[in-house]
Image (spheres, helix red, strand yellow):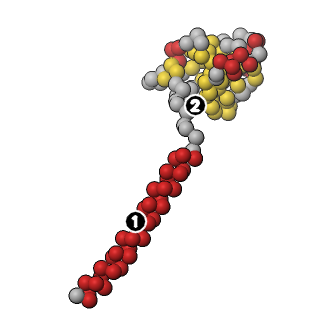
Amino acid sequence: MSKLTHVTRPALIGLAIAAGLSATAASAAQGDVQAKPAKPARQCFYLSDWRGWTAPDKDTLYMKVRGRDVYRVDLSWGSNQLTWPGTHLVSIVRGSDSICNPLDLDLRVSDGMGFSTPIRAKTITKLTPEQVKAIPKKYQP
């Protein structure tokens, strides 16, 4: 009987420690969930809904989507050609034309003479109506 008591005591102590750690971890996880801000909903659009663009500088695009939404695209690889008159923005679509993150955009700037320069999106942000109004008129897409 003493052998059974000897084995049971360490097992009970181990279970008590595990239960205490589990409760602590659960309360910590619950506290972390409450401390983190809510993750914003994904803001996706389709390239087929793209209606125009402007570029205030070589590293920023404003894209008009569905006639009412404006997305700001910050570029990690921009081009001075974006600000030149007569340039075209070309999008290469492979598979779905759904754009949900920067890697979904495969963009090039074309001078209209057959040459194009790749540009790379870093971030895509859907602007609020107030942010759209704050864009200078000459850069409104």
User: Foreground: 103 or 116?
Assistant: 103
Q: Position of residue 135 (x, y in %)?
A: 74, 18
Mark 1 and mark 2: Cα distance apart in space: 44 Å
Amino acid type, label 1: Ala
Question: Depth-wise, is mark 1 or mark 2 nearer the camera?
Answer: 1
Q: Position of residue 107 (x, y in %)?
A: 60, 23
**Residue drawn at (64%, 22%), measured in percent from left and top?**
128
Whether residue 129 is visible, yes or no, is: yes
N-terminal-most mark, 1 or 2: 1
* Label 1: which secondary element: helix
**Residue, disc 2:** 102
Total marks in image: 2
Which image quadrant: the C terminus?
A: top right
* Label 2: which secondary element: helix
**Residue drawn at (33%, 76%), measured in percent from left and top?**
11
Whether residue 84 is visible, yes or no, is: no
**Residue, disc 1:** 19
> Dot 2: few (<14), some (14–19), or many (≥20) neighbours within 10 Å?
some
Which image quadrant: the N terminus?
A: bottom left
**Residue drawn at (61%, 28%), measured in percent from left and top?**
124
User: Foreground: 45 or 92?
Assistant: 45
Q: Position of residue 63 (x, y in %)?
A: 63, 18
Horizontal arrangement in the rendering, residue 97 relative to residue 11 (left or right): right
User: Relative to 1, does residue 62 appear above or below in the rendering?
Assistant: above
Q: Quadrant of residue 59?
A: top right
**Residue drawn at (35%, 79%), measured in percent from left and top?**
10
Amino acid type, label 2: Pro
Horizontal arrangement in the rendering, residue 44 relative to residue 64 (left or right): left
> Dot 1: few (<14), some (14–19), or many (≥20) neighbours within 10 Å?
few
Q: Quadrant of residue 38?
A: top right
